[in-house]
Image (cartoon, rainbow, N blue to C red):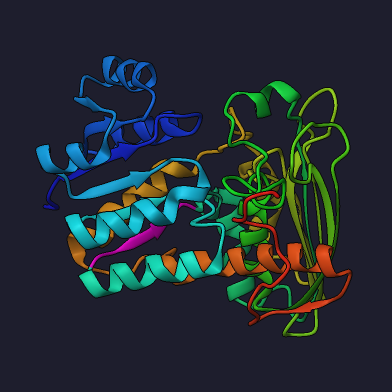
């Protein structure tokens, strides 16, 4: 029987309820404390969960018995907290996407956890969506054959009030734009399905919001295997969310997963069909109730299992860094107006920088 793993939350914002609800449903997990700089927010979550609350995470880590820290703060301080927690408190770390804003910060997080013998998990819950798992299975078994084109579309609605909720939203220093925030999961899915990226060429615009960063962006991707890709992302869909989708086209078939959280099978067709193919679209077409989808519980179950069995995580720091490098390359391209080849050091990307 697996040991119960004790979790603490740092950050009680928009996504925290997904982690709290997921932990409630995992028998081998326990939420033991929460922390937020805003006292009212911390107190409210504490009242809802029945656990102690703090406004200083260092006090929490000194006072409570904790195995894993879940970092849910603004993206720009993920790295600072993670490195501190690893070096000074020796706790395993779960961090929401993106794991950091700057590649050097992501590298510091990975190094800190490696040096301390700790596990670093990056939240990519959409990898656990049932249609996504089915697509991955088709790719691994070679059903699509040679890959031709991969496309992700994030057409979501975020009004100005969304960005005005917190002063860090839509800033280069703490958040990033639609590529970094809303499309991060979809960019991760694209590279996970299509393979390593060779180069990117991107364009962005700020169309409907009063923010530093982009609310709309498009990009063309070239993969190492020769396939091409397209990223389309915006928070300017009106009057409501339209989709968060991924399409993969290969020489032997096409799969499209739609909905607004890449959680609804739309197209599942192959040159050589199997008897069970007829039922796939119906079986995997359930829409989630919100943009976060169904995957947090499955993700956190894997975290618990990885810690208890001392096994490698599906989405560790190295894996989480891949989409961050792509995102930095997208911004490098928008600033230079040039194609950017990966395995690069950002020079012009504004991500993680203070706006002058």
Of all residues, the one furthest to the bottom in this rendering is 225
* Residue at x-position 76% and y-position 72%: 272
* Residue at x-position 63% and y-position 82%: 343
185 left or right, relative to 242: left
163 in relation to 261, above or below = above
User: Is 101 in front, or is 27?
Assistant: 101
* Residue at x-position 82% and y-position 64%: 335
Q: Is residue 4 magenta?
A: no
User: Is 259 in front, or is 167?
Assistant: 167
| Image coords of residue 279 (percent x, y) | 66, 48
* Residue at x-position 25% and y-position 74%: 115
Residue 303 visible in image: yes
| Image coords of residue 36 (percent x, y) | 35, 30
The quadrant in which residue 186 appears is bottom right
| Image coords of residue 64 (percent x, y) | 12, 38
| Image coords of residue 249 (percent x, y) | 81, 67
In this figure, what is the number of numbered marks? 0
307 in relation to 259, above or below = below
207 left or right, relative to 60: right
User: Is 77 in front, or is 122?
Assistant: 77
Bounds of the magenta segment: 118-123
The quadrant in which residue 340 appears is bottom right
316 left or right, relative to 58: right
Residue 269 visible in image: no
262 in relation to 134, above or below = above
User: Is 15 in front, or is 78?
Assistant: 78
């Amino acid at each position: 029987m697996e040991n119960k793993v004790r979790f603490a939350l740092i950050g009680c914002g928009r996504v925290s309820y997904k982690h709290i609800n997921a932990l409630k449903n995992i028998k081998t997990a326990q939420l033991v404390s929460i922390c937020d700089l805003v006292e009212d927010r911390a107190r409210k979550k504490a009242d809802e969960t029945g656990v102690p609350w703090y406004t200083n995470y260092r006090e929490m880590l000194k006072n409570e018995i904790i195995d894993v820290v879940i970092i849910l703060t603004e993206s720009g301080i993920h790295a600072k907290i993670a490195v501190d927690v690893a070096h000074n408190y020796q706790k395993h770390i779960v961090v929401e996407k993106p794991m950091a804003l700057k590649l050097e910060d992501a590298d510091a997080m990975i190094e800190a956890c490696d040096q301390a013998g700790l596990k670093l998990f990056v939240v990519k819950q959409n990898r656990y969506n049932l249609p996504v798992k089915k697509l991955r299975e088709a790719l691994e078994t070679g059903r699509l054959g040679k890959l031709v084109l991969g496309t992700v579309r994030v057409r979501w609605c975020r009004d100005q009030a969304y960005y005005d909720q917190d002063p860090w939203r839509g800033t280069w220093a703490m958040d990033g734009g639609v590529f970094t925030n809303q499309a991060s999961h979809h960019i991760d899915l694209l590279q996970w399905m299509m393979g390593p990226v060779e180069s990117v060429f991107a364009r962005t615009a700020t169309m409907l919001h009063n923010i530093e960063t982009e609310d709309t962006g498009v990009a063309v991707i070239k993969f190492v295997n020769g396939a091409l890709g397209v990223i389309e992302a915006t928070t300017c869909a009106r009057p409501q969310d339209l989709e968060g989708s991924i399409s993969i086209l290969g020489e032997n078939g096409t799969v499209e997963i739609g909905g607004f959280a890449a959680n609804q099978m739309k197209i599942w067709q192959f040159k050589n069909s199997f008897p069970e193919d007829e039922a796939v679209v119906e079986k995997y077409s359930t829409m989630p109730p919100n943009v976060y989808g169904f995957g947090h519980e499955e993700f956190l179950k894997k975290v618990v299992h990885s810690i208890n069995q001392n096994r490698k995580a599906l989405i560790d720091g190295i894996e989480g860094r891949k989409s961050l490098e792509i995102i930095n390359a997208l911004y490098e391209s928008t600033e230079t107006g040039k194609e950017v080849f990966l395995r690069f050091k950002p020079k012009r990307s504004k991500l993680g920088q203070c706006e002058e």
